[in-house]
Amino acid sequence: MNIRTFTKLAAGAALIAVTAGAAKAQEGVEVLHWWTSGGEAAALNVLKENLQKEGISWQDMPVAGGSGVQAMTALRARVTSGDPPTAVQMLGFDIKDWAEMGVLGNLNDLAEEQGWDEVIPAALQEFSKFDGDWIAAPVNVHSTNWLWLNKAALDKAGGEAPKNMDELFALLDKFKEQGITPLAHGGQPWQDGTLWESVVLSVGGMDFYKKAVIEADPEALSSDTMRQVFDDMSKLRTYFDPNFSGRDWNLSTALVIEGKAGAQQMGDWSKGEWLRADKKPGEDFVCIRFPGTQGSVLFNSDQFVMFDVGEDKRDAQLKMAGAVEDPAFQIAFNTVKGSVPARTDVPDTEFDDCGKKGMKDLAEAAASGNLAGSLAHGHAQPSAVKEAVFDVVTQHLNGQITTDQALERLPQAVASAQ
Ligand code: BGC
């Protein structure tokens, strides 16, 4: 080999090395999510750090707003401008909608390699797969029909956990006598919807929830049972503090943590805030199923979808999806987040009592047919229907429409959004 050829080859090799180095340095993910509260951010850090250890950089795109309504608006704007993020936190029916548009990356090879089919339960696969292809990596299972109580306030009120709506109202009366806000609620449509679905389940039971919410049956939506639901919502409203309107969910949790309020109805992401404040279940707070709903679970699952943004991003996307399904990550993340693992083969040993209860309740509800998707968190109906329900529920809760009007409008609003 003459020196000229050698120099040429060496220069070529150097160029390849530089290019590969640059590609490696660039390997990263931009992640759109709505995990902005203290507890949520702490959980997200587990994932960030795991990926950084693997040399994947993390570009954060947080969009505040519980249940992700604002995050989905931001996502649409990014996609419309032709620049989707690489990875997006997403819920239920939104995943189906984006999958239908054919813009999500296929995760089949990774799913097969890691055996997702065997360990992700059917209720989640329903949203993680589209046309038989894996298009989302489930992070967790949350559930919404919980009540979070300040233990000291509960003890002072006699220590009995309420088992139905009447007992709940009696307990809230006792909190009122203690001079604290009985029920910490944040008046935002998604929070109103989260409270409403628990009341629907409590008043009507799972069969009614399925009929009214999952099947959107017009008769169920305007039935006497639904009348009772709206009446109970009006009654619950009398236990809120005057500043409830527009308040973020985590600020309501803080009121219960500080003992300024007795209870909060909220999904189990609320536990993340208690843990973040160094509080312990059974000592500082008590988690119970929303009164009258023990045995049933309304679930939602945070999943990451990978937008089809080009081959150069693919490796980092797959590493992120793979990291999410790692059993050790499932434990590390979900013990902090308040949720339970998306995999059925993860032991509950490292979970606290609320986490253990969450896992047991979920398994039992799935086995007995008492597991259904949360409407407020995207697992019962497409967004348009969900928002139509929120409109009616919020207007009613704020006294802008009567119960009679709510019963008339609910089926109409749902029908026109379908
Ligand atoms: C998500 C949770 C999140 C909560 C509040 C839910 O829709 O599933 O992960 O913590 O909204 O933002």
Image (cartoon, rainbow, N blue to C red):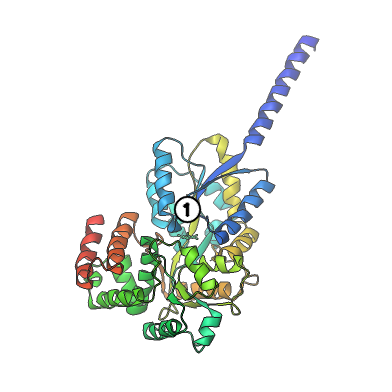
289 lies above or below 387: below
Task: Mark 1: give few (<14), some (14-19) or many (20+) Cα within 10 Å.
Answer: some
330 horizontally vs 108: left or right: right
17 horizontally vs 27: left or right: right
Q: Position of residue 299 (x, y in %)?
A: 44, 66
- Say which quadrant the C terminus sits in: bottom left
Q: Nearer the viewer, residue 134 or 150?
A: 150
- Say which quadrant the N terminus sits in: top right
Q: Position of residue 73 (x, y in %)?
A: 39, 47
Q: Position of residue 311 (x, y in %)?
A: 54, 35
Q: Nearer the viewer, residue 323 or 5?
A: 323
140 lies above or below 202: above
Q: Residue at x 62, y 35 (%)?
A: 26
Q: Amino acid at mark 1?
A: Ala
What residue sits right under mark 1 in the picture? 64
Res 306 seen here? yes
Q: Nearer the viewer, residue 310 or 390?
A: 390
Q: Residue at x 32, y 58 (%)?
A: 387
Q: Position of residue 162 (x, y in %)?
A: 44, 84
190 horizontally vs 106: left or right: left
